[in-house]
Amino acid sequence: MAKARSNNTDSFPLTYGLDTVTVTLTKHAGAKKGSSSQHIQFLGTGLSILEKEGKKVTFNYSHTKLIKLLNNLYSIHFFNLPTRYNIKYSVYLKEDGTVNTNALRMVDASSTTICFNIPSFEKCVTYSSDGPTELQELTKYLFSEAEQLANITPTKK
């Protein structure tokens, strides 16, 4: 069972078994014509799965690499990030002098979701093209690394 820093449900785990860890990355294609979702699942057992263009490929992902990935999540304060970066907020002034807030979620825009999961804890962050730079860079690196380890030629854009 994971031990959290406090009783706050947003606290990240401090102790857990490596074999219980799952880190998933999903690129949601959105409404862009000709694009498809991509998915990686890094499992603490050392097995990983890359799903791209409807094909699933398994590959080995060492414990050393997974620990490096976990350290990256901790170093960018992943567990303290908001769960959604793909909602745009704006405010406007009404005639009576009150300020109202609009929330716009672009459901047809592409986005990426990163999730850390152990049996007693889950943290997911979804972001779009203007999401945190650290998450964008980590996602790009992990998809590239997974394609290399799974011996898949990257799709040209």
Image: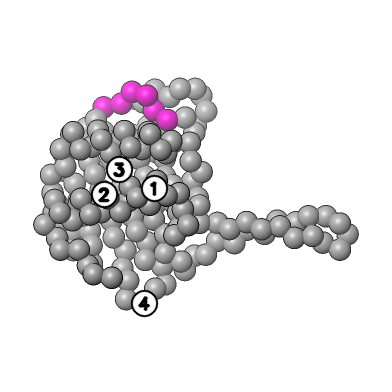
What residue is rendered at 30% in x and 35% in y? 70
Chain-order first, disc 2 or disc 1: 1
User: Would residue 139 be counted in the magenta stretch?
Assistant: no
Residue to which mark 1 is pinned: 135
Query: What is the CA distance from the residue labelled 3 to the residue labelled 2?
Result: 11 Å
Nearest-to-viewer mark from 1 and 4 = 1
Q: Which element type, helix, strand or loop, lies under badge 4?
A: loop
What residue is pinned by disc 2?
Answer: 142
- Residue 103 is drawn in which quadrant? bottom right
Q: In which quarter of the image is the N terminus?
A: top left
The tag earlier along the polypeptide, 2 or 4, is 4
* Residue 112 relative to residue 84: left or right: left
Q: Mark 4 points at which residue?
A: 33
Residue at horizontal 32%, vertical 71%? Answer: 35
Crowding at label 4, few (<14), some or many (≥20) Cα neighbours within 10 Å? few
The foreground one among 93 and 133 is 133
Q: Mark 3 to mark 1: distance in Å?
A: 13 Å
**As drawn, which residue projects farthest toward the bottom?**
33
Q: Is residue 45 visible?
A: no
Inspect this view and state whether residue 6 appears: yes
Element marked by disc 2: helix
Q: In which quarter of the image is residue 117?
A: top left
Mark 3 crowdedness (10 Å alpha carbons): few <14, some 14-19, many ≥20: many
Q: Circle 3 sits on which residue? A: 23
C-alpha gap between disc 2 and disc 1? 10 Å
Q: Which of marks 2 and 4 is in front?
A: 2
- The part of the chain drawn in magenta is 12-17
Q: What element carries label 3?
A: strand
In front: label 3 or label 1:
1
